[in-house]
Image (cartoon, grey):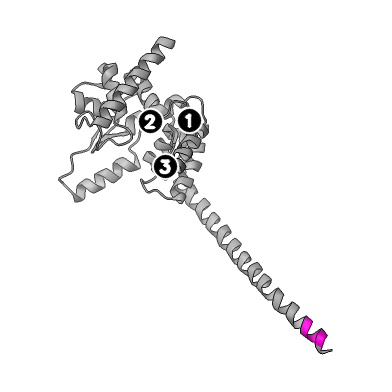
Amino acid sequence: MKTWLFRWRRKRRRLKPRAKILRYSIYLLRIIVLALVLDIFYISTIWPNWAEYGRGAVKKTKFIQAYETRRQKNHKLPPLRWKPVPMNWIPRHMQMAVIVAEDSRFYQHTGFDLDALKDAMEYNVEHLDFKYGASTISQQTIKNMFLTPARNPLRKWHELILTVGMEVKLSKSRILEIYLNVAEFGQGIFGVEAASRYYYGVSVYTLSKRQAAELAASLPSPIKHNPQTRSQRFIQRSNKIFRYMQLLEKKR
């Protein structure tokens, strides 16, 4: 009798940790479901009316609004320079330069460049440096328009969902048009028209191929590397972009 009772108690003790794990798992699942429901609700509140973004003048982005807010608090910041222009004002070599610099497979992927992501991950693991990502022009456009510069998994998740929506609703040409008009090319300088006028004193319409390569070389670190600072990295990058543009033209 004592032996049987001892075995029963020992078996009961073994089951307790399993019961605790099950209970905690249920709690965790409930928290995940609640967080998912709340996040879906949040996404629904920021979900754009894509028809408004599919045509007409390019709208002011979250990044531009954030810069205006910062300048109200710090008047030492340069004034906002932003002048959106239609796509037919932007020469093809300017479009090509940005695609070469930022997203060479822009017209081949559907918002996410898996090959570039794989290369970036391999580089980060090899160099133990998680600095380099693989954001496409579509992802950068979404981040500029609707999100914040914060680097966290939740923001990247929202970026992913919104990028899918934009790729479905807008044409590649329109996505590129928006990006060219909102990308940051220096402190307070947004879009290729404002950048062309600030750095070269001309409209983007008359920009040379070399100048286009230089503007594209400003991305993605325009504060440190731009046609005004002319850092070594900037010069090397602009030369590389210009040479690649020439190769692409010869192949046509």
Label 2, secondary structure: give it: helix
**Relative image position of residue 91 (x, y in whole percent):** 33, 18
Amino acid of disc 2: Ile
State the separation of the CA atoms marked 2 and 1.
10 Å
**Which comes before the other along the chain, label 2 or label 3?**
3
Magenta span contains residue 5: yes
81 or 12: nearer the viewer: 12
For the residues labelled 2 and 1, say whether their Cβ atoms are less than 8 Å apart: yes
Residue labelled with disc 2:
178
Magenta extent: 3-7
Residue extending farthest right: 1
- Of residues 44 and 110, the one nearer the viewer is 110
Q: Secondary structure at mark 1?
A: loop
Q: Quadrant of residue 90?
A: top left
Task: Name the residue at 35% across, 32% down.
Answer: 58
Structural distance between the alpha carbons of marks 2 and 3:
34 Å
> Amino acid type of disc 1?
Leu
Relative image position of residue 62 (x, y in whole percent): 34, 43
Task: Report, in whole angstroms, how far the alpha carbon at label 3 lies from the one at label 1.
Answer: 37 Å
Q: Neighbour class for label 2 at 10 Å: few (<14), some, many (≥20)?
A: many
Image quarter where the C terminus lies is top left
**Disc ID at residue 170:** 1
Query: Residue flagged by tag 3: what amino acid is it?
Result: His
- To which quarter of the image does residue 19 belong? bottom right
User: In the orientation shown, which residue stands out farthest toward the left?
Assistant: 76
- Residue 5 visible, this orientation: yes
Crowd band around label 1 with a 10 angstrom C-alpha radius: few (<14), some (14–19), many (20+): some
Give the residue number, with chain letter if any, for mark 3.
127
Local packing at callout 3 (Cα closer than 10 Å; few below 14, some 14-19, many 20+) is few
